[in-house]
Image (cartoon, grey):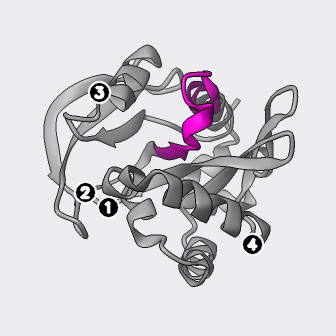
């Protein structure tokens, strides 16, 4: 059951113990981004340059210095956790969890969203689906949640298929990504514990 104290204040996601490290399956887990992950994640982005054209936060990551700046931003943002997706201890992707604090215009503090990218050789194995589903379960079990949110370009058919498999539905709402200007459609999934 959701701790009533947690639901009465805007909490720091970094302080929710259940969100700190999440085991997904044998040898696969999510843990908050660490400096030791930077080089491997940068290489993933360099091998598939299209990621930077589809994932807002990835579009800012071009050097190890950029990763340092991103970690500093994350540490100050109480509504954001970026997880390294590890397989047998090796970084293979990044999954973000964010509380809707108004980045897209209107604050919906009981809405939580996701972003992600994955090493090209690990795609098609269900790892992002597993990661996001588990994160939704953990968030819904520990926080008050209205709905889960994701944004995706209409041309990104692989991500759209993934979102639909997880039960997300497209909306008529689109947003222009503020820093790069691409247009993304909002996808939503009502949470189990919503009122």
The mark closer to the camera, 4 or 2, is 4
Secondary structure state at the residue bearing disc 2: loop
Mark 2, residue position: 106
Secondary structure state at the residue bearing disc 1: loop
The mark total stands at: 4
Secondary structure state at the residue bearing disc 3: helix
Q: Earlier in the sequence, mark 1 or mark 3?
A: 1
**Which label belongs to residue 157?**
3
- State left or right for residue 93 relative to residue 159: right
**Quadrant for the C terminus in the image:** top left
Q: Which residues are magenta?
A: 114-133
As drawn, 67 above or below 149: below
**Which label belongs to residue 35?**
4
Q: Earlier in the sequence, mark 1 or mark 4?
A: 4
Q: Earlier in the sequence, mark 3 or mark 2?
A: 2
Q: Where in the figure is residue 114, as x and y percent of width and height?
A: 47, 43
Q: Where in the figure is residue 70, as x and y percent of width and height?
A: 55, 74
């Amino acid at each position: 059951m959701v701790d009533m104290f947690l639901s009465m204040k805007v909490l720091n996601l970094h302080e929710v113990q259940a969100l700190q490290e999440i085991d997904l399956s044998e040898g696969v887990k999510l843990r908050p981004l660490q400096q030791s992950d930077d080089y491997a994640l940068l290489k993933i982005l360099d091998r598939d340059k299209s990621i930077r054209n589809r994932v807002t936060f990835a579009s800012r990551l071009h050097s190890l210095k950029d990763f340092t700046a991103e970690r500093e931003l994350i540490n100050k943002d109480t509504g954001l956790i970026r997880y390294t997706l590890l397989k047998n201890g090796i970084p293979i992707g990044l999954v973000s969890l964010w509380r809707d604090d108004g980045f897209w215009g209107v604050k919906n503090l009981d809405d939580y969203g996701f972003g992600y990218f994955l090493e090209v050789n690990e795609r098609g194995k269900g790892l992002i689906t597993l990661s996001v589903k588990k994160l939704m379960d953990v968030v819904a079990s520990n926080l008050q949640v209205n709905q889960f949110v994701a944004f995706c370009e209409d041309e990104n058919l692989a991500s759209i298929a993934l979102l639909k498999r997880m039960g997300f539905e497209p909306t008529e709402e689109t947003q222009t990504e503020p820093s790069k200007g691409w247009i993304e459609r909002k996808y939503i999934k009502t949470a189990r514990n919503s009122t």
